[in-house]
Image (cartoon, rainbow, N blue to C red):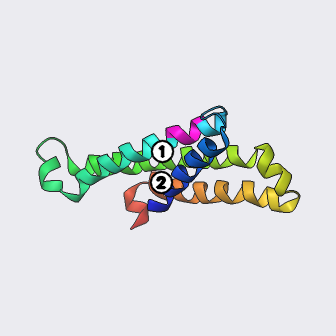
Amino acid sequence: MCDFFEGFLAIYFTKEQYGKPHLSTPHSMLGAATVCYVLMQVCAGINLLYPQFISKFADVRAVRRMHGLSGAFLLLLATLTLLGGVNTDWFQERVTGPVWYACVACPLVIYSLIAVQVLSPKDKRE
């Protein structure tokens, strides 16, 4: 998780250093939305570390299920952000051919596997 924010800060300071505009592409806007959603997901997930407090307000099992679904949505946002980065001019100048297709296919396969696991009914996973 710390690497995620270090990458975000590296991008921010690099754009500042070279005087380039922030949030000027769909990829960057989706990336910013993903970062904000990560922060919200972390804050919500902290409640699950202390179920005795959350149980006063909600069913803990329902909150866990919603946290899992929300995590699947977060993974979708991250995957879309990654795929947006693959389609930038910078990336396409450096990566071509079969490697480019692998860079597109891998996150889609990973997302599919994790989403199926999170979204499948609990009794099938045990």
Disc 1 marks which residue? 35
Q: Residues within 10 Å of mark 2 (few under 14, many from 20)?
A: few
Q: Position of residue 91 (x, y in %)?
A: 77, 51
For the residues bearing labels 2 and 1, Cβ distance under 8 angstroms: yes
Instruction: Name the amino acid, label 2.
Output: Phe
Check residue 42 for magenta coloring: no
Q: Which residue is pictured at 78% across the width and 48% down the height?
A: 90
Identify the element where label 1 is drawn.
helix
Question: Camera-side residue: 81 or 53?
Answer: 81
Q: Residues within 10 Å of mark 1 (few under 14, many from 20)?
A: some
Q: Which residue is pictured at 58% across the width and 55% down the height?
A: 111
Identify the element where label 2 is drawn.
helix
Q: Which mark is residue 5?
A: 2
Q: Which residue is pictured at 73% across the width and 54% down the height?
A: 104
Q: Position of residue 110 (x, y in %)?
A: 61, 60
Q: Indicate the quadrant containing the N terminus: top left, top right, bottom left or bottom right.
A: bottom left
Magenta span: helix, strand or loop, mainly? helix
Span shown in magenta: 29-33
